[in-house]
Amino acid sequence: MNSTTGTTEAQGADDIYSYLYNQITNITYLKTQPGTTSYVTEYDITFNNHWNSWFSNRVAQLHSLGFGAYGQDSISDSNGTMSVRWKEGSAAWVSPASASYHDALMKQPSSVSSGNDYVNLPAATDGTVVLGETTVTVGDLGMRAVSFTTPDIHEYLGVEAGGWDGFQTRDRTNTNLHQTVTVVDISDLIELVQQAADIVGQYQNNAFNCYTPQSWATFSDALGAAQADLNYTSMTADQIISEAQSRYNTLQTAMTGLQQNTEEGSHNLIEQADSTHATCTAGGTAHYICSVCGYDVKTPETALGHEYIYTPDNNGTTHTKTCSRGDVNETEACVDENSDLHCDLCGQALYTPANWEAFNAAKAEMESLLSASADGSMKFTSAALEDANFNIIEIGYYNYTAEDQATVADTMQDAINQQTRMINAAVTALRNGLADESVYEANQFKVSTLNADAYNVAAVQSAVSGINVETPVEVNGNVYTGYDYDNYNMALGTALTENWIPYTILVMDQAGDEYWVVDDGDGTFSYTDTERNASEFHYGDSVTVQNPDGSDERCAWISYVYTDNLEPDVNNKYQYFGSEYTFNVRGYTEISTTSGAEADTALQKVTFFLSLDGVPTNKVIDVQYAKNGATIRANNLNLYYNLPFYEVDTFYNRADMSVLGKGSRAQIKVNGDMNVLVDFTTVSPTDYTITLVDEEGSQLDMQHASYNELVTLSADGAVAYLNNANGKALCYGSEYSFYACQDITVKAVKSVDEQTASVDMASPIIDSDAGKVYLVGSFALPEGVTIQSFGFVLNGLDSNDTDLSLADISAGNQIYNLSASKYTNEGQNGNQFTVSFNSNRMYPRGTVVAYAIYVDNAGNQYYTYSDVITDAALQ
């Protein structure tokens, strides 16, 4: 609060003096907090040492500084405690032996030894300072002031005086090192002011008049006076205590004098849960409690009695009777006692209302369709929505509310019935305008993955880019979205028509004569010997051609297919034996035929069948025609030398199983029409595990099969079979047959929401001995659709092409369409297909995806793909 600084007169002897230099000699503290409080004040003692003996100035050793007595550092009385603490920082502590600097100066003289554990007072020096501080600690003093004065300081010094004087000690008391600390305690006032401020806050400055205005004004004035500033620096302690006590007394009196307000309109009264109010028929008790001060008041209420109001229902027959206080609400028949055709109570004209039941049912159906359009659960064309709006405008009663309808008499029933028929017609028209989103979505997906071997993909995608299929249409004041998918579908149809890639088909007979295929336009096909007259075919077209040497003559059909993007380095592939051959166009197609045996009696027919490890498969792998006695070399046959994990072994005459030759260099001598078994033996046995589970994952069957071994799975009640690993449908039907090519778990399911197109594929199969890669895929399609094309898209340069599709085909980028020409198990709805090629060290890994292209009964074409296999091993 205030303090006095000064220098005391030095006291001492033997030319060693101590005093306070520029130190606080008087200081007053203001105590504002309740409880025990401490006040620390700097208290430094200065020493001058000019002891001289035996013709020399001597160092003085300060061993003790007692606070009223040696070894004492505090004094106490009923008001509190005053203590001292000596601190390092100026006069040096020499040869420390005590626990602290302070402890060193608290020694008893009996513990003093020369040169040990002392504070050094250098010879012939002034102003050596021993740092210290006093601490005054008081509790709650009440409203008063107390003072503490440091006691006399007891100094014990020692000097090595020299000569025969030896170690000299001095025991002395300095009575002139006093510091007075005064504590003025006004904490009671501060605490009372805080209590008063809490009342102000709690009662929101009496905003709701919880206390009477007069008592609150007295309280506010007293609080303001108590909070007013005090000029502490110009007041004595007694003056401060006197003023604080006066303010305390005034404020305390005002606080006890606050009077609760009982006037109406005062308090912030909140109605309680048990409060009840009088109704027309019963009394009640209103119960309120003030949310600010807790004032509780209960007021009884008497019954009010009814006050009826009659409101016309505007229906010519009834009105609504209510009470102004809301406890009656009932419909009752109108009364016409004076026979003026008006209700005596509500005043409305009396009539028979029309019947709106059929009208409202028709309108509800229309509104249901519009609601479905608004939330997107049904989508209509913009033309259908526009027609609906036109029809609603023509229906005058359409927007009548129930209240409006009630005002219409039965004399207008014919008009209502006519407009009901108009609504029903409008509903039928709107339903007929339901937009088919499925074809649009399929077309969008088709465009994004369009076959680059079939179309100019960039041109098609550009033609349909940015086509808008959504149009806002206002119907009866609300805006709906019309969906004109045909805008896109028709543009796509035009783009596909203008940007398809044409392919021609060449058929050669045994003599090498060339015939170009012509589409006769009626589902049949013929030949021309001139290429310029050949028909141009779309990718995926189904074509049936006859043996050019005679439509009734059977022959072998061997095909070679290539596109601008891929010209496979493979031999012609045997496809079929018969008088005609049906296939889907997959590019430029060259077909070789043999002469039929019936057409050339000089030739014998030799049919080669596949056999695996001595087990015939009845699969025809080649048909040859040669003269009797001629030799057919095995290495000229269209044999399956590329079967993974197998090699050609023995040729048998199937009639008697006699050996005709062994290995790829075997020579078979023709002896009449012959059936020859070509047996392949396993090189690297590969055993696959096929597991069948039900919908709960329980095992139904487990089989082990080698590559290309036919496996058949069945389960009671099954309607489809799925790849358990990815959920892809493998087959629709009660039984599933396939050729083993991987470890797989198949799930049999007893129901599907709908049959959807699905394509799956196994990881590439590598036959490192033969240097071949085999891709095996499968497709399962909805009933009634027709497969057009299937195969694989391979990216040999990018092993992480996660969006790979037919649209990416590019020979320059090493992205190829590896189309397959045959599929297995034609009689079931789940078929496998395979493609093989030579491995290439330049492309050890790549990306591959399987696909299928099919058309529905309406002629819409769809694309579907398997999961993309990235980082696929290709060698």
Image (cartoon, rainbow, N blue to C red):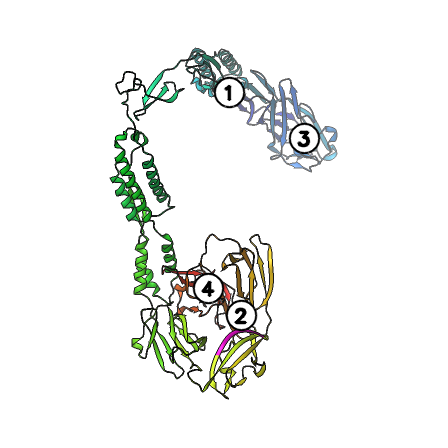
**Image spot of residue 749 (x, y percent):** 53, 55
**Where is mark 1, residue-wise?**
194
Assign a secondary structure to mark 2: strand
* Label 2, label 3: how far apart the Cα atoms are: 96 Å
Q: Does the magenta stretch include residue 617?
A: yes
Q: In the rendered image, is residue 49 in sight?
A: no
Depth check, mark 4 against mark 2: the one in front is 4
> Is 127 or 624 nearer to us in this picture?
624
Decide which of tag 3 and tag 1 comes sooner along the chain. Answer: 3
> Is 340 or 41 nearer to us in this picture?
340
**Where is mark 3, residue-wise?**
105
**Where is mark 4, residue-wise?**
850
**Where is mark 2, residue-wise?**
766
Q: How crowded is mark 1: few (under 14 residues within 10 Å), some or many (20 or more)?
A: some
Which contiguous range is marked in magenta? 615-622
- Amino acid carrying mark 2 in the image: Ile
**Residue 683 vs residue 494: left or right?**
right
